[in-house]
Amino acid sequence: MNANTRHNISLFLLGATVIFGIVAYVGAQGDIGWSTLDATYEVNFGSTTTRTQYVFDYGLLGFKGFIESSPGTRDSTNGQYDDDDKCSADYCHKCHDAGASTVTMLTIGLVASIIAVAVVLMRKNDAQSNSDNSCSKKFLAMAACGTMGVASLASWTTWAGGCHEEIVSYFKNVNDTFDLGDYVQLGAGFALAVLAMAFSIAAGVNEGKNVKTHLLPIKKSPNNSNQKPCHLATPGLRIKVQGTHIRGAHRPPSPATP
């Protein structure tokens, strides 16, 4: 695979990462649920059957949904977790804290993704012009992709442990005859965060191909003489001390003995 194709793959992965992050981000008020509840249960009283449906989408900062009871009575509810008039359940303040932290991490990740896109574009232009492709750009692209990956990982783990489990626990006890907690599921926003993590890490690995980690000097390829080799460690010198070759020493060789 040549450098131009590799960079195009990275740009596709990063473009998808940015889209995933933005969609998960803009649905913070409940338009994109990070957790969802969709449950219907029936209770029989003699010849009368009462049917109740719960439908809620829980976003990073707020929620939207309704409770509908037969015969057709619907109570719509939406609001933010930090509004005590709209959200008074046990999970409200914990979800507010978890959601605010997740928004911060997603913001950091999106900024890192945009930086990664810019750096990969520069690397692609370098490859097309056959100019010297500096190692610093390679490492910067890898670092930016890694930052998005870590931020996405932190965001969905924070939500799962800080809010989702609290919602599940609340709905397990809200009804004595029907366990609504079993119907609380992780939603599209959570899935998008996981995908953003996977795609950004894949882009970072793709950009980091051919990075060398050994200590010996790296020879340039005759077919790519304009490309400087990238290495993570300082090249060592081979010196001879009392007839023994030592690798990795960082000092000039001793003068030859006459």
Image (cartoon, rainbow, N blue to C red):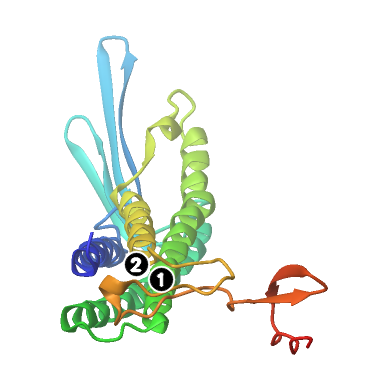
Indicate whether 238 appears above or below 35: below
Indicate whether 64 appears above or below 115: above
Image-quadrant location for residue 83 = bottom left
Q: 24 or 123: nearer the eye?
A: 123
Residue located at (57% from left, 71% from top): 216
Is 31 positioned to the left or the right of 163 in the image?
left
Question: Farthest residue in the top direction?
Answer: 46
- Looking at the picture, how far across and down is residue 19, in whole percent? 22, 64
Q: 161 or 1: nearer the eye?
A: 1
| Dot 2: element | helix
Is 34 positioned to the left or the right of 211 in the image?
left
Evaluate whether residue 34 shows in this view.
no
Position of the C terminus by quadrant: bottom right
- Looking at the picture, how far across and down is residue 46, in whole percent? 31, 9
Kind of residue at disc 1 = Met
Dot label at residue 174: none
Residue located at (34% from left, 71% from top): 221
* CB contact under 8 Å: marks 2 and 1: yes
Evaluate whether residue 50 shows in this view.
yes
Is 188 positioned to the left or the right of 181 in the image?
left
Indicate whether 111 appears above or below 87: below
Residue bearing mark 1: 142
Position of the N terminus by quadrant: bottom left
Residue bearing mark 2: 207
Q: Earlier in the sequence, mark 2 or mark 1?
A: 1
| Dot 1: element | helix
Image-quadrant location for residue 105 = bottom left
Residue located at (44% from left, 70% from top): 147
Image-quadrant location for residue 109 = bottom left
